Image (cartoon, rainbow, N blue to C red):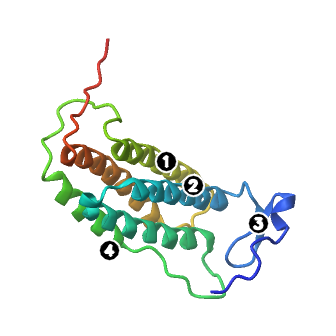
Amino acid sequence: MRITKVYTGVGDGGQTYLADGKKVSKTHPRVEAYGCVDELNSFIGLVRSKLPPHLSEVDGVLKQVQNDLFLIGGDLATPEGAPFEVKRLGDEKVKYLEETIDGFNSDLRPLEEFILPTGSEVAALLHVSRTVCRRAERVLVRAMSSDETLNPRVQVYLNRLSDLLFVLARWVNWRMGVPEEKAEFR
């Protein structure tokens, strides 16, 4: 794809185009959903920029996730029945997340209490990404209530992704020798 002009002027009036060419408000549920996914992708990019070289296995996972999030963005931006074929998120992406969660989690001690979303800078950024992911999931669920054609696998993927980001935050702290801080309820 070659883009010669970044600006179109359509957004100046609060409108944008879905991938099928339909003009909608920037507050359209699909636009809200893929906007949150884009924000999440950017936060994950920030995490990757902060990863030390000895955590390359985390970088590989996050790079795959970023590519999946681009796929999701296209999926969400393209209504069913578009006059062209679009790749949709499939079950294999959810399975990848589940296997990855299990792999990283196997190194960690079982969680017996609530922990604070802190630790190393990378772990803290993973926790921020996790909360952005949860928000993206909530926005998507709201969008799904008004548009039954949205791919339900995307919601499952985002749900698993937030779990992965939590596990990765714990794992990064473990690998960096940063102890977890228990939440105190006083």
Residue 100 pos. (x, y %): 24, 62
> Which residue is situated farthest in the top direction here?
186
Query: Is there a contact, CB below 8 Å, between mark 4 and mark 2?
Result: no
Q: What residue type is labelled 3?
A: Thr
| Residue at 63% in and 73% down | 79
Q: Is mark 2 on a helix, strand or loop?
A: helix
Residue at x 85% of width, y 67% of height: 9
Please state which amino acid type lies under the numbered disc 4: Glu
Q: Which amino acid does label 1 sit on?
A: Val
Q: How far apart are labels 4 and 2 at the CA level?
A: 22 Å
Between discs 3 and 2, the one toward the N terminus: 3
In the rendered structure, the answer to whether residue 5 lies left or right of residue 84 reads right
SS for callout 1: helix
SS type, badge 3: strand
Q: Do the residues labelled 2 and 1 touch (CB within 8 Å)?
A: yes
**For mark 4, what is the residue?**
92
At x 23% / y 34%, what residue is drawn?
A: 180
At x 62% / y 88%, what residue is drawn?
84
| Residue located beneath label 1 in the image | 132
